[in-house]
Amino acid sequence: MSPRPRGRRADGDRAASASSLHPVPARELLEGSGMAVPLAELLTPGRLVLDIWTHERTFDRPGAGATALYRITAVDPSGAGISLYAGATTSPAAAEGPVLRTSLSGVRLFLWLHPHDPMLRDLAWALSPAEVAREVFGSIQGGPAVLEMSGYRPLRRAVVHAVHGAEQAYIKVVLPGHVDGLRARHELLADSAVPAPELLPGAEGRSAVVLSALPGAPLLHTLAAGSGRITPADLTAVLDALPEPALSLRRRPAWAERAKAYGLAAAGVLPGEERRIRDLAGGIEALVKALDAGPVVPVHGDFYEGNLRWDGGRITGVLDVDGLGPGHRVDDLACFLGHLAVLARLSPQSALPDRLAEFQPGFEAAAVQAGSSAAALNARAAGVALSLVSGARAGRLDRQANAALRLSAADALLDRARQGADA
């Protein structure tokens, strides 16, 4: 039996509000003060005592459980403080890996200490400076590599930026069953005009790939500053260059095709808006089914500003190609438009609202040219915006206010879709 934790939340003690007669939603459970008990239990084998813990972020995947990350300060047997990160999930898939199996309020939980993600078996290797220096850069001269986590989706994927002297690379860690498909996608793009990262040696036999760095800066910087002369045509030109053999790959459902599931996740963040969210998700689903999406063509699958780099007046990098495969052009356009609509709401003082006003008509014309319609584009973009609600985080605004702005972006897109469908 683990000792009673002395741990406390760094942001105050917020107890779960649901009574024992009503199941506690997974998100509320993972973010509530009761998590002190399983977190303390996680530390016990290492003879550590929980002191302070902070909930960092929750990832709520429709149909696949909720996962949270925590920052921890623990005390070792000598009384010294140690900083750690931990993860906890309700996903039963995590039980396949080395985790602490426990329960809280009748809900099964699986916990681990970073970087020992139970599904990403090579994440610990990718975060080992000595091993990366030896296996990725082929040298132990010059000391260990300098590593920085540049992206992490618990139980799904991680990206580590590695620097060794004048060399650099990105290590992408994925699920064991996904690495061959990811390699195949990068190999396809290597023979195309799409400026995607090149596969580099260094991760053979691992559930990871090593990728080259690309020039330029994130496209968001250009959009937010209002600089550069990027147009919808610059983006559709990248999509036109996607290789035809991608049509033989596995198709991934578009974001808007899962509107009801994302609506459930959104209602977990904004429970007071549950009816509004349910109506929104239903409206998206109805239009997605009713409106022609156009022919099946090669698509990127997650085409938005965060996966694009810009330099010298052109797109210089296309990242995160895991979703490359068959789909509808309108969904790639909708992905970009949905993200842009959310960003414009979150940063009204930037140039993003003006960029949205410029890009939306251009994307609508591109959707028509691709065999779909402006109404279908906006309905599907509303589905993308809805999918972003549950990922809201506290920053300039608190999480609920942030989520509410994302929801309002989805509402506005659906309204425009309905107007177009009725015209």
Image (cartoon, rainbow, N blue to C red):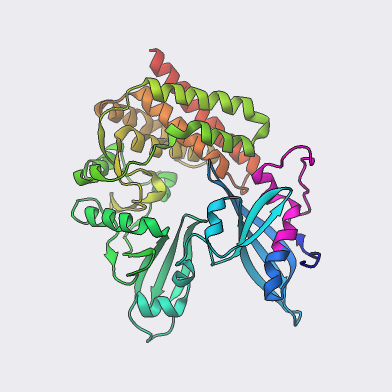
The residue at the far bottom in this view is 141
- In front of the other: 42 or 278: 42
Above or below for 85 versus 28: below
Compared across the picture, whether 347 is left or right of 190 comes to right
Q: Position of residue 240 (x, y in %)?
A: 22, 41
- In front of the other: 365 or 83: 83
Residue 109, quarter of the rendered image: bottom right
Compared across the picture, whether 122 is left or right of 61 comes to left
Magenta stretch encompasses residue 23: yes
- In front of the other: 55 or 250: 250
Tell me the quarter of the image containing the C terminus.
top left
- In front of the other: 220 or 23: 23
Residue 390, quarter of the rendered image: top right
Compared across the picture, whether 214 is left or right of 90 comes to left
Above or below for 201 versus 414: below
What is the span of residues highlighted in magenta in the rendered image? 11-39
Q: Position of residue 59 (x, y in %)?
A: 56, 49
Compared across the picture, whether 248 is left or right of 153 comes to left
Tell me the quarter of the image containing the N terminus.
bottom right
Q: Position of residue 134 (x, y in %)?
A: 37, 80
Number of numbered markers: 0
Residue 245 in sight here = yes
Residue 10 in sight here = no
Q: Position of residue 344 (x, y in %)?
A: 49, 38
Question: What residue lies at 65% left-to-right and 40% top-to-bottom?
Answer: 400
